Image (cartoon, rainbow, N blue to C red):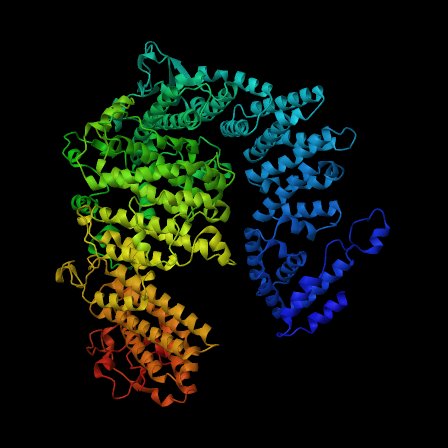
Amino acid sequence: MPHLLRFLLLSATPANAGRIILQIREQLRLVGVVDPRAARSKKMKGKALANSTDGAILDTLRSGLRFKNMLCEAFLKELKSVDHPRDHKVIDVWLIMLIYANGGALQKSAEKILKSKILQGCIRETLFDQCIHGNTELVKLVGSLVAHIGSGVSYEVSSSLDIMISLTSNHSEELIPISSHITGILDYLESFHEDNLRKVYDIFCHLALAAGFNIGSGGSSVANELLMVVRKQVSNPDMKYRRMGIIGALRIVSTIADVDVNAAVNCSSSQQLNCEEALELLKMSVNSCKFVTLPLIFLYDELASLLESKVLHSAIVEWLGDYLAEFDTSFLADLNNGELSEKYLNDGIEGELWMNLDGDLSPICVNIVPLASTLPQKSQPCLQILPSQFSLLTTVERLINEGSLGGLNALLGCPLHLPSTKHLDGAKWGNLSGLQKKAVCHSLYYAINWIRELLNAFSTQVASRIDNFSQKARDETAVKLLKRLRNLIFLEGLLNAFLKKYPLSLPELQYLGDCSGSTSTSKFNLPKTMGEESMDGTSSNKRQKGRKDKAASERMNPDDKLKQPTVLDAFKRAGVTVSQATNKASSQPSSSGMMSKNIEQEANDPGEFGFVDLMAAPVQLDMQRFKFRSLHTRCLSLLNYSECQDSSCSYLETELPIYLYLLRDLHNKLDNLNPTTKPFLSTYQAKCSQVYCHKSTQEFLDKIQPLFSVLRKHLDGAVSMIKDESESCTDNWSSHSSSAGNPDIPYVVISKSSIATAVCKEILGCYRKLLAFPDLLNQPNMSGLKQLLQTLQPTENFDDILSEFQPSLAPSNVDYLYCGACKMFEDIMDPVRSFSYLLSSDVLITMQSIVNSVVVLLDEPGESNRKNLQIGCSKAIIPFLRKRLGQSAHKLLTADHPSEDAENGCQSKGDLIQKILQIYLRNSDSTTDLLHELSGALSQVPSTKAQGTQDASNGFPTLCSSTIPSWYRVLHEENTGGLNKMIKQALKTRGLPERGSIDTILEEIQKSVKVFVSLIEKCKTHEKVSMHAMAVKHGGKYIDTFLKAFNFLETQFKEHNAIILQMLKELQKATRIIQTICAEAKGYKRTMITSKIPPAKRSMERFLFQVKALLHNCSTEKKFWMGNLKHKDLHGHVVSSQVYGSVDEEDEEQTESDSDTPAAENDNTMDEDDAAAEGSNEAPMEEE
């Protein structure tokens, strides 16, 4: 058989390759073929040797396909046409593997086809089982897996560990004798992250458990070695090894103390021994971490997570309950009639009770300020473990009381002992010492995290039904949780304001792995030592100012780097103090403070902190948010509740601040799961920021699916609030804030005008994240995608706009739902556009995410029409959605600025306008024609504000003198990108030329050239240095792209020489202007332009040689001739070469056009100073 296959493969030709592949698939059988010599030996019975028939056949196929791409292509083509799972054979899998193993150009194609077949369910697990029928020795398999585990490649390590867990779970008896080969995994522990560490310990726990049930098998050494390693790691002073030991110890406890595992053991003595061993190991772990803060926090969190996921022996739970009984004495203080028995005063810090929800009935308070104000070495570890210990306490309480937290109910409403509000006054704050400020900030920080853990714990009482918990109690608990959210908003706003004036590195309340310690704080440029001198000293202020200036320069807009330095900039660099009275008035946006009119007229002086807007994003806290305790996903269920039962009270006004906080947290969770940009933290640090991370994105999506309808409800409410624009009652927030126990601080305010806008922005951001989730677009998750889209349907019927589809779209199909979601956002944009330009642009970008979602869903490699029918989505909706998206973008570009944005103008929205313009251009019917139209509109914009107003006759109010650089950049980028697509299309059609298609491509390229020339000529009327810099930069890129078309132009020159020569003539106009800009930039030392000159010069030099070669090869070289030109400026005036200091005195050679070219075109000259140095004629040419 191998010889016959070799003969067939060698004799294959393009004509018979398909037939040969078809016969191989139909006739060749690879299942159950066993070498006869192996069958004679009882030890080798059922196993194939390496030199068996199967091995020889596969070796022949591998060598035959290696240099026969036509056979590989024929097979892949044949495999694509196979749709049913029953028609796939074992040989198909092996051929894909062989093509992939041989490498080459078809390797990626083979991988894509295999993945698509697996996703479609055509190639199933049973087929792979048949492929490896009669595997090799188990020792070799284990050795290979261990090698992959130690490879350091993340996906190899994770997959190999999963396979090893499967083997040890199902075949532990067979693996015990060769356990010495598996222990090699322990050598790689240091390189594993926490998930992989858990997998490693699960492997050894399975082996040790099986060895314990088989006395005398020789496997008990696995358990001894595992326990020895874990004990050493737990007692190691290095946190890295101690973390490994904690994980290992708890995995062992979860294995041998698991109720289900012990139920399978018939011997009661074995059950007792397992429980005692687990309890001893747990006690040893707790005692080793008792006096070290971060390991103890990590141990508590891991233990709480373990108790929620597995049912452990009752003795373990009882011991934990006894151990945690000391929580009361450590962190709580008794009250008499809701008041402290004596007032606290220490080191000048006076304490008082905050946020008492139970009033006089509260018997206890959380004793924060006394612990935070004492010496750090005594107080810090105690308060740092408060949230994690409380989390473990509530987990144990729920296990003991069948899910109820009735025994801890007093903690939900009890007050917090915090610094007196008189220390928070702006004037008195400045009199506090550095240690006192630190104590106040730490007290607020611990209070914030205490409330976050309260939400985590008691949200279990409202998120799911508990048998012994009534509906009335559930509603009361939900109201208290909403009040605690008000407390949380208040505290975070205060602490954020304090950190602006007193930068402070906050302590870590959850273990961050390798990110813990000083390395984490250094990433945020926070002071390492917090004393009076570090804050009040002038040297520290200078360092902070330098850091801020550096951070501001790093965040600078790319367009700002192209701006000409102003006189004020020069003064600042020279150290001259500039009055900031006008700067503050002009630079502070009217909407950034989000302050309502009644706040502006407030007589109270905000003092040092200014007005603290609780609705503004807490930027200072967000920089250190990774140190905070994370809110669990179940806390988001509070979005369904309302604390206001009175129908006369507008919930939009009173509840939206609470919902905004939860929506921001949801947005952050979605961003961590599917980040669009590189996270601010490192990869490991970002991963560690969520202690209670989900095993998969799918698990998270399952938990938040009930929130889809809630998001739509709050979006509609916020939009209706924007539509009404009614004056809200100023006392609603303050009254609810008072009922939640928040102290009255005059400078803490709520900007009501910004609440609705902020809520809309967060919900739109959540929608964009959800629509971009790859897991949500998989076929198994179609129900989740449909559920999301169903909540995005418009309230009114929209079938009239779908009349163009034949046959009509079915309302139950995904394509109908996508169209409805697009229409819903269109309906939202109309009222929002008149209120906020920024918010309406967010709506537009969300519409774009809908289009992107459809494209990803339908344009996957290997996707067939059959699958499109299965998911109920047709590609016909993509042009429809793009058209609607382009129309919406056009509405925004032609809309007048609303009153909210009028004072800011267009200049602050440069990046936003670029994005909208890109959407408009990329979703139009003819991008080239639209580019030509918009390039003409640029000519109607005055070069300066003094020459005209924004209300130009170009039809685009967003196109003005301040935004023209943004428009100019986008038009250049889109024009160059469009030309690149045209050239690729031209090169594809070169093999099968069609007269009509060639003419169309050449016409489109010519249009693109005209747009390019028109954009470059704008530099004659607009003297902004930023525009000239972009002309040089993008001009060089465009010429580089055009160079790719010369092979195509040369093949078409004979039939289309007129249009090709016209293109080159048009391009010469642009290159001359670019040369002149370069000459002036060098003469006047405009550094922002000169840095872009070398690549542009090189591109134009290559263009010159390519044109000369084209004309020479096409026997029209006489149209290319040389001449001398004078130096002229952009306006055509002759200037002396000495005007530009760096320009050479002698005239440079330049190609001239024939006499029929207008003199005005020849008057445009260029800088020739680089031509002599580069040894060529740098100037562009003209043709007859």
- Could you say where residue 307 lies in the image, as x and y percent from the top left? 54, 26
**Nearer to the camera, 412 or 1028:** 412
**Nearer to the camera, 935 or 653:** 653
Figure disc tally: 0
When the figure is inspected, residue 618 is found, relative to residue 835, above or below; the finding is above
When the figure is inspected, residue 20 is found, relative to residue 158, above or below; the finding is below
- Could you say where residue 896 lies in the image, as x and y percent from the top left? 18, 53
Q: Quadrant of residue 314?
A: top right
340 vs 179, left or right, is: left
- Could you say where residue 931 lies in the image, as x and y percent from the top left? 29, 66
Q: Identify the residue at image location x=29%, y=81%.
A: 1146
When the figure is inspected, residue 1038 is found, relative to residue 551, above or below; the finding is below
When the figure is inspected, residue 179 is found, relative to residue 1104, above or below; the finding is above
Quarter of the image for the C terminus: give it. bottom left
- Could you say where residue 338 lies in the image, as x and y percent from the top left? 32, 12
Q: Quadrant of residue 387?
A: top left
69 vs 177, left or right, is: left
Q: Quadrant of residue 92?
A: bottom right
Q: Is any part of residue 1090 visible from this angle?
A: no
**Nearer to the camera, 586 or 147:** 147
Quarter of the image for the N terminus: give it. bottom right
Q: Is any part of residue 315 visible from this angle?
A: yes
Q: Residue furthest right?
A: 40
312 vs 90, left or right, is: left
603 vs 1169, left or right, is: left
